[in-house]
Image (tube, grey):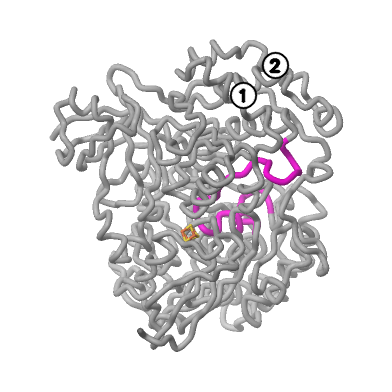
């Protein structure tokens, strides 16, 4: 059997049951998932998604660098250039059409902290309540 | 959920509706099955399909799609008529009972049968089993909410629980099973157009003042609620919305009426996508910002029973991607000019958008949110805490509404049954229903990249009733075309006797067979949730 470098307890990224996952990691790769018996929501049970649905973390399709559309094509860009462009365009559009011309979709897949900060950007910096997520879909 | 997952084992009766729990919430269905088999709990299942839980049900009611309110009203009629309503609870803790009584007065079981197709006798029996239970818990999922009258459906269920005093005690309550892992949290955190964290309304002047003071960005929070996602998409088309920032979502695939959304997104002046994959939305974006997966970040998710739980970084970030919190903070700095480079004159900077990690962000949330004031990352280790948790020595709240409801008295909502926005007719004789299957997840961006899962169920099938198939001369494996008033989709047919006649079922995990190209854009007038479960379609062999 493979011996893990470490086992990290976290929360399943798939559904709202919130099963506790123990990620077994070897050389920064998840190779096995278990769940502790005292997990509050799932008592150690996991469904097929929680137990086996982790390959996507290491997928070759993962985005590794920012992309910007230039001449109609999405091409790799540096972080500073990409972020600078986003901020510049958002402020331009806000100043030209008003704050309510911008919408923010936050995410039922992202963490609480990320969602909080994103709506803080929308409400506190742009000045719009156009904040929603797709989970009502 | 008003109650907890563990309450499944404390209920005498479980009423499950609009939730194929086995497929969408497998671990919860396991608990339900245990409750039935080991403890003899009774299960009332309301679902047109012959889903797996049907094998465990005492009663399986199969109403015509979109007639939930009629069925639930008829059950309320029986509960009142047979004296099963808990008068003391109604007197002490509720209001508007007379209005409900009036509204269900004409909803006799025979009327219920005429509208829903569920036999009168079964409606009576279901009402009796639910009404006589010492404790009864209701569970539902998207089958109830994804309807042009989803809010009515939920209120009709709440009426039943109020009538029978099934609130505030173990094994009771009304319990939505949240779909995605952090729907609960996204709503709790102010990821909605009308409320900030902990459902504090933007319309409330004191709330706005509190956040403006804490944030110190110099920007006024508008008092008017913003647009919902469906309204934003319409806004793009009619020119009101010029820019969209999309984090971790894929509306180009998951929205109803996908064609309309793609048209909108292709036209927009500026689209940003922050995601881990180049999904259908990102492909249309002007800038794509690579975030990281749950395994590379710290933070919290809140599950369907309101339990805030830790997410822990297990590995370094992938490539040159960045943690999503870092991306947002960077954006915050640039927008407020505290990076010293841009726009210093645009917004007066005070909040500097630097946090010592996710736990520090949480502390800001807790400081501004009374119902979560007692929660810190430190306290969440190892079992999480269920909000409300107003103080550091508060243990959290497994059961809501114990002594009183949040609003004081529980209010009955009188409801009138309305037909779904689109019923089948001569031209489009079938009803399309959409949903999840066990092995895949939502738009499939994660699960379809997990080899084990994609191997078990690699294709998006179109399920039809076996007799309908015979009549249309379609066999399992044949290619069929499903057409609605909004679009068409071609895919492989799968004949099944689990579906009632006249129903077509598609899951929405596969971009090649995009069920949402067919669904309508009728939405619930209050919750603005689209009607996913009832669209009229026709089927042809190709
Ligand atoms: S393991 Fe399965 S049931 Fe548990 S949270 Fe993950 S997806 Fe949901």
Q: Nearer the viewer, residue B281 or B266?
A: B281
Q: Which residue is mark 1?
A: B127
Q: Residues within 10 Å of mark 1 (few under 14, many from 20)?
A: many
Q: Residue at label 2?
A: B82
Residue bounds of the magenta highlight: B166-195
Q: Is residue B119 above or below residue B342?
A: above
Mark toward the start of the polypeptide (1 vs 2): 2
Magenta: predominant secondary structure element?
Answer: loop
Residue B267 shows up from this direction:
no
Local secondary structure at mark 1 = helix
Q: On what subunit does the disc labeled 1 rest?
A: B
Question: Residue B513 placed where, x, y %?
Answer: 26, 46
Mark 1 near mark 2, Cβ–Cβ under 8 Å?
A: yes
Q: Chain of mark 2?
A: B
Instruction: Using residue A36 as the reference point, say whether residue B442 is left or right of it.
Output: left
Q: Indicate the quadrant containing the N terminus of chain A: top left, top right, bottom left or bottom right.
A: bottom left
Residue at (56% x, 52% y) in the render: A132
Disc ID at residue B319: none
At a point 80% along the width and 51% down the height, the residue shown is B205
- Answer with the quarter of the image where residue A41 lies: bottom right
- Please provide percent x and percent y for residue B350: 72, 76
In the figure, is residue B364 to the left or right of A116?
right
Disc 2 element = loop
| Residue B177 located within the stretch drawn in magenta | yes
Q: Is residue B102 above or below residue A102?
A: above
Q: Furthest residue to the right?
A: B92
Please say whether residue A43 is one of the residues in the magenta stretch: no
């Amino acid at each position: 059997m493979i011996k893990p470098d470490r086992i990290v307890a976290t929360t399943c990224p798939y559904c709202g049951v919130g099963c506790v996952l123990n990620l077994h990691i070897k050389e920064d790769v998840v190779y096995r998932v278990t769940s502790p018996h005292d997990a509050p929501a799932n008592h150690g049970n996991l469904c097929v998604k929680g137990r086996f649905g982790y390959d996507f973390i290491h997928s070759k399709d993962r985005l590794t660098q920012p992309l910007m559309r230039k001449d109609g094509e999405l091409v790799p860009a540096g972080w500073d250039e990409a972020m600078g462009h986003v901020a510049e365009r958002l402020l331009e559009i806000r100043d030209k059409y008003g704050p309510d011309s911008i919408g923010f979709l936050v995410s039922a897949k992202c963490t609480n902290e990320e969602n909080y900060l994103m709506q803080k950007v929308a409400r506190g910096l742009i000045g719009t309540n156009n904040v929603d997520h797709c989970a009502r879909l | 959920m008003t109650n907890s997952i563990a309450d499944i084992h404390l209920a005498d009766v479980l009423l499950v509706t609009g939730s194929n729990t086995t497929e969408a919430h497998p671990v919860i269905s396991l608990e339900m099955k245990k409750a039935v088999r080991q403890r003899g709990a009774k299960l009332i299942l309301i679902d047109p399909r012959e889903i797996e839980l049907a094998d465990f049900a005492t009663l399986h009611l199969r109403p015509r799609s979109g007639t939930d309110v009629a069925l639930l009203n008829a059950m309320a009629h029986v509960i009142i008529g047979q004296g099963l309503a808990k008068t003391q609870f109604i007197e002490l803790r509720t209001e508007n009972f007379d209005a409900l009584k009036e509204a269900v007065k004409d909803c006799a079981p025979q009327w219920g049968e005429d509208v829903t197709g569920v036999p009168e006798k079964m409606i009576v029996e279901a009402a009796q089993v639910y009404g006589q239970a010492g404790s009864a818990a209701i569970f539902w999922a998207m089958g109830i909410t994804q309807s042009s009258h989803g809010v009515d459906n939920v209120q009709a269920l709440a009426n039943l629980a109020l009538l029978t005093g099934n609130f505030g005690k173990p094994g009771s309550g009304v319990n939505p099973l949240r779909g995605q892992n952090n729907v609960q949290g996204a709503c709790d955190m102010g990821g909605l157009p009308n409320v900030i964290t902990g459902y504090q309304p933007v319309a409330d002047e004191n709330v706005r003042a509190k956040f403006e003071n804490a944030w110190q960005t110099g920007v006024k929070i508008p008092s008017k609620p913003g647009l919902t996602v469906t309204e934003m998409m319409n806004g793009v088309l009619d020119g009101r919305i010029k820019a969209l920032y999309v984090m971790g979502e894929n509306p180009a695939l998951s929205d109803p009426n996908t064609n309309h959304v793609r048209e909108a997104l292709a036209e927009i002046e500026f689209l940003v996508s922050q995601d881990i994959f180049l999904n259908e939305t990102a492909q249309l974006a002007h800038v794509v910002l690579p975030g990281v997966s749950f395994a590379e970040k710290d933070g919290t998710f809140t599950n369907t029973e309101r339990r805030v739980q830790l997410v822990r970084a297990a590995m370094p970030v992938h490539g040159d991607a960045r943690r999503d919190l870092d991306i947002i903070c960077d954006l915050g700095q640039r927008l407020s000019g505290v990076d010293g480079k841009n726009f210093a004159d645009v917004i007066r900077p005070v909040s500097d958008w630097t946090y010592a990690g996710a736990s520090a962000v949480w502390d800001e949330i807790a400081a501004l949110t009374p119902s979560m004031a007692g929660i810190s990352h430190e306290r969440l280790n190892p079992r999480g805490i269920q909000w409300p948790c107003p103080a550091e020595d508060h243990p959290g709240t497994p059961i809501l509404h114990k002594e009183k409801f949040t609003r004081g008295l529980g209010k009955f909502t009188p409801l009138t049954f309305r037909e779904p926005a689109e019923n089948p007719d001569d031209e489009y004789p079938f009803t399309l229903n959409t949903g999840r299957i066990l092995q895949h997840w939502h738009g499939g961006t994660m699960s379809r990249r997990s080899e084990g899962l994609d191997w078990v169920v690699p294709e998006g099938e179109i399920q039809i009733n076996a007799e309908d198939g015979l009549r249309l001369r379609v066999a399992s494996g044949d290619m069929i075309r499903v057409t609605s008033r909004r679009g068409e989709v071609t895919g492989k047919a799968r004949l099944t006797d689990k579906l009632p006649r006249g129903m077509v079922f598609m899951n929405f995990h596969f971009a090649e067979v995009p069920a949402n190209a067919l669904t309508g854009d009728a939405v619930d007038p209050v919750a603005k949730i689209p009607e996913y479960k009832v669209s009229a379609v026709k089927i042809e062999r190709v």
